[in-house]
Every structure is written in C-alpha cells, then in structure tokens.
Image (cartoon, grey):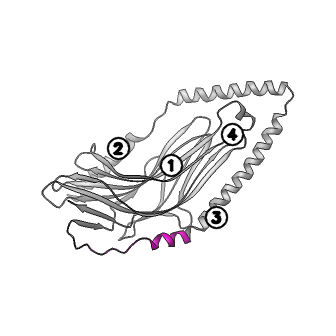
Amino acid sequence: MHADALKMAEAAIAATAERARRRQDRQYDGARADAAREEAELARRELVAGGLDLQRLDKLAAERSKARRSRAEQAHAQAVEASVAAGRRLAELTPLLALPADPVLEIIEKVTFIRSFADAGTVLDSNIGTADNWAKYRIRGSSGGVKESGTGRLSFFTLWQNPHGRTITVTAGARLVVNAHVGVDADWNGVAAWFISGSDARATVRARTTVWAVWDSNISAIVHDHVLADVGASGGFFGDDDSTTIEFNEFLSASGFLVPGHAYILIEVELLTEWSAANGSVTLDAASGAFQVAVPHLILTLT
C-alpha cells in the first residue's frame, strides 16, 4: 500500500508542477522588444547626425560593465571559499533529537525522495539518510530582449500515513538548512538606455512547506512560507548586479492540516526561487564548495 501511495503522490506532484509552469505571450512581448529596438536605432541616427560619438560612449559602458562583472565574480568566489566555515556554523545549530515521550509527536529523520522539476533547476548530487538528507542544487535563468520569468524548485518530499482510524490535525514542522549564494546581473545598455527601459533582473528565495493530500491532488495547503533572500538589479547605462549569501538554519513552524483516518499525505519542504529578467541573468548556487540545502528532520504534531 505504501508503494501505491508513493506512486500516486509522485504522479500528482508531477502533474501540479506541469500546471504551474508559467506561460507568456511571447509573440506580444517579442513585438514590443522589436519596436523598442527600432525606436532606439532611430534616436541613435538622430544623435549621430548631430555629431555625438555614440561608439565611444558604448565602448565606455562595455568596459565599465566588464570591470563590474569581474567584481561580482570575485564576490561569488569569496562566498564559495567561505562556504566551508559557513557549513560548520550551520551544522552546530542543528540540535540532536531524542525519541519523544509524548505520543502525539513524531520525529522523521529520513525523507522519502528529493527532486527538482523541468526548467526549475538541477540537482547535481543528493543523499537520503538518517538526519542526513541533503542536495547540491543550482538554477540559472536568463533573458534577452524579451522579459522572462521562472521558478526554481528544490523539494524534499516525505510520505506519511495517519496511523489512526479517525481524522486528525497534523502540524508538519521541518528543519531547513541552506548554505547558498544568489546573484543577479542586468546587462549594460549604453546609449540605448536613454531611449528604452533597459535591463532588469530580480530573484526572491523562499522557504516553503506544503502539505499535499495523496487521496486528492486538488487538496493542498502552504503551511509555512517566508523570504530568505531578495536581490534585484536595473541595468541602465553601465549595467548593474546584486548578490547575497544565504546562511540559514531554522525550524519551520507550520499550520495544521486535516488528515482522514489511515490516509496518506505528502509533505514538501521546498527552497523556492522566483525570478524575472530582461536582458539579464539570475543564478542560485547551492552546489559549489560546501554549498548545499538540507532537511535533517521533520517533527509532526498529531492532535
């Protein structure tokens, strides 16, 4: 029965992930981008006719952007180098748990499976073990002239069955440990920035816990959600970038979820990255050095 419930849960999660993929009117957005480029070129011709050296200005913007990106790459390298020490600090914050004396508490130290989704990042390595559930994960998003948006999802799933023959309320708390670096880059626009909206790149990284009803994939609830990091850059003439390191180790409290007698639920603890970019890029690195994401344990309260 457990295997059948797991297959149902995996199929339901895959279906909801496909429904959630964002779709855009690319024809309309592409037409807008083409129009903006045409208008910028018309304005450039007028400025050249007036004697302004636009090539020199664009060369200056490109040179300054190269130096800026070099600084951003150096900051990322320094974050990777510091990831080992950060990992030690985060590990010290995870308490050792003993079996609870109270029967309404249940400790789960091994998740059922770990995965990402299509266009939602790549799991480069992972492990499932007693208090040792972790993944190396990376997502990259980018866009040319047409604005793009996307979602990165790294999810730790735990399948659980109500042991009682009656409906109960389950509060699914989880410990989440994140050692990662997120950065955005908005391209330089040079003289074109005088005439068009330019470039932009933004990302928000969230910790989220969702409970899914295996008996009905239309029933689910987000029981915990908060922002871990928020970065943004607007390119303008010279371009721009923004980044931050995420060092997080906290127990994610949760709201309750009703579970019928002997029914199964799937508990998803997720690192969610929501991003958008126009002539820019977004990178979440939870794979380099000692970077990783872990869920050491869940604690369920049954009432």
Q: Residue 241's spot in the image, x, y percent?
A: 64, 49
Residue at 79% over, 25% down: 45
Q: Type of residue at label 2?
A: Thr
Q: Which residue corresponds to mark 1?
A: 204
Closest to the camera, between mark 1 and mark 3, is 1
* Image x and y of residue 124, in percent: 49, 60
Q: Amino acid at mark 1?
A: Thr
Q: Earlier in the sequence, mark 3 or mark 2?
A: 2
> Which residue is painted at 73% across and 50% down in the image?
66
Q: How many marks?
A: 4
Residue on which disc 3 sits: 78
Mark 1 touches mark 4? (CB < 8 Å): no
Q: Secondary structure at mark 3?
A: helix
Residue marked by disc 2: 16
Element type at mark 1: strand
Instruction: Give the Cα distance between marks 2 and 4.
Output: 38 Å
* Quadrant of the frame with the C terminus: bottom left
Magenta residue check for 91: yes
- Which one is closest to the eye, mark 1 or mark 2? 1
Report the amino acid beneath label 3.
Answer: Gln
Mark 4 sits on what residue?
236
Q: Earlier in the sequence, mark 4 or mark 3?
A: 3
Q: Which kind of residue does numbered mark 4 sit on?
A: Gly
Q: Are marks 4 and 3 in contact (CB under 8 Å)?
A: no
